[in-house]
Amino acid sequence: MNKKRKEHYLILLFLVMLLFQIKIWAQSPNDSTASEIKAESVNPAQAEIQSATENSEAEASAQPETQVENEQDQKMDNSGETKDMTWELKGSTEPDKATKDILDTILAAPYMPIDILVGDQYLLTSTDAFSFYGIIYTPLRPIIDLVQGSTLSWDQEDLRADITLPLNGGVKSLSFFANSTFYLNDGVLTSLPSATLQKDGKMMIPLNFMTDLLGITMEYDSVYHFVNLNLENVSINPAVLEHRFYGPEELKAFSRLIYKEAGGTTYKAMHAVASVVLNHVRHPLYSNTLSGVIFATAPSGAPHYTPAHKPEFASVIPNYTSVLAAKWVLRGENSIGQAIYFNTRPFKNKTILTKINGIYFCY
């Protein structure tokens, strides 16, 4: 009897324990409920950041490449709004201050004008070419107009020259910006070897860059400061070339004469001597050509200018100042009025206008 009670007691105990365990299982959350509880335990701000990060990563992976590249060209301004920072290509009315100061200093004094020749003809320019830091700058338009079939238009708002050039059987498109080291070559932003400059309202560009671009050669005479362009492979527009009353050989002879007559003096004296020679060209009693005056002889056979008749005259190398004086007088300057005589001693029965560095100027 006691044994049966004991067995009943054990069975009852087992059933009680089983019911207790079933109750615990019934109260335990399922997997989805556990996930919800776990999610609720996360900080809401952290959940928002995590969600935003996941969404942005998903959008970036699905975003077109062009859109990503465009967004890289944007930055935030102070207001927090996106602002397009793509560089707008525009010229500048002035070069940087350091360049401007040096350029103004060079061009303030009588600077050496550089003539550009094609054969024995001169390129028509309203502004002379000049040298700046060893680089020859020339007005852009005359060089472009020299090529038959080319065009040039000016955009005043952007200070930009737009050009088309017939080259190698095709048409090249170029855009140059004032006072800039960049240009557009068939729409591609490209660096210039030297910046463009502005002088007298004209865009100046490195001449050697243009000759390389056009595939032409040039020869520079560093004594007489002129450039001769070889345009055999380019169709030339003759309307932009001119014959002057003097050619390159006459310029050389003129510079030599000034050097021999006033060498060792000042620019002022050399300029005055050059002015007298040009007064002879304009005078009705003398030849109306520069070479005719330089190499003239009197009816008696006496030379008009003795140095010009010396055997060594053709090999004389003039200095910089004599060439400078020759060029500016040939461009119309006159510093001596109507004087048609000069000598280190005053002429008898002549009116003395002035004396410069020991040279008397008379008429």
Image (cartoon, rainbow, N blue to C red):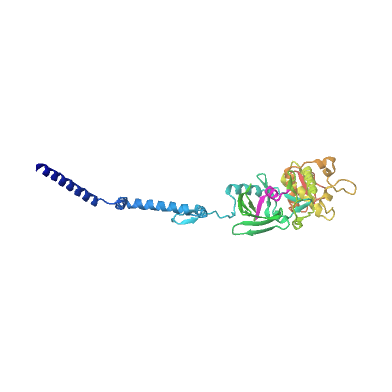
Q: Confirm whether residue 351 shows in the render.
A: no
State which quarter of the image contains the N terminus.
top left
Percent from the top left, x then y, of residue 342? Answer: 79, 47
User: How many numbered markers are drawn?
Assistant: 0
Q: Confirm whether residue 291 shows in the render.
A: yes
Outermost residue on the right side: it is 300
Instruction: Confirm whether the magenta stretch covers residue 329.
Output: no
Q: Residue visible at 83% across and 40% down?
A: 312
Viewer-proximal residue among 19 and 52: 19
Viewer-proximal residue among 181 and 115: 181
Instruction: Confirm whether the magenta stretch covers residue 208.
Output: yes
Along the horizontal axis of the image, is 97 left or right of 33? right
Q: Residue visible at 85% across and 40% down?
A: 311
Q: Quadrant of residue 244?
A: bottom right
Outermost residue on the left side: it is 1
Percent from the top left, x then y, of residue 72? Answer: 50, 52
Percent from the top left, x then y, of residue 355? Answer: 75, 47
Percent from the top left, x then y, of residue 343? Answer: 80, 45
- From which residue to which does the magenta span run? 202-216
Along the horizontal axis of the image, is 155 left or right of 323? left
Viewer-proximal residue among 353 and 257: 257
Viewer-proximal residue among 102 and 6: 6
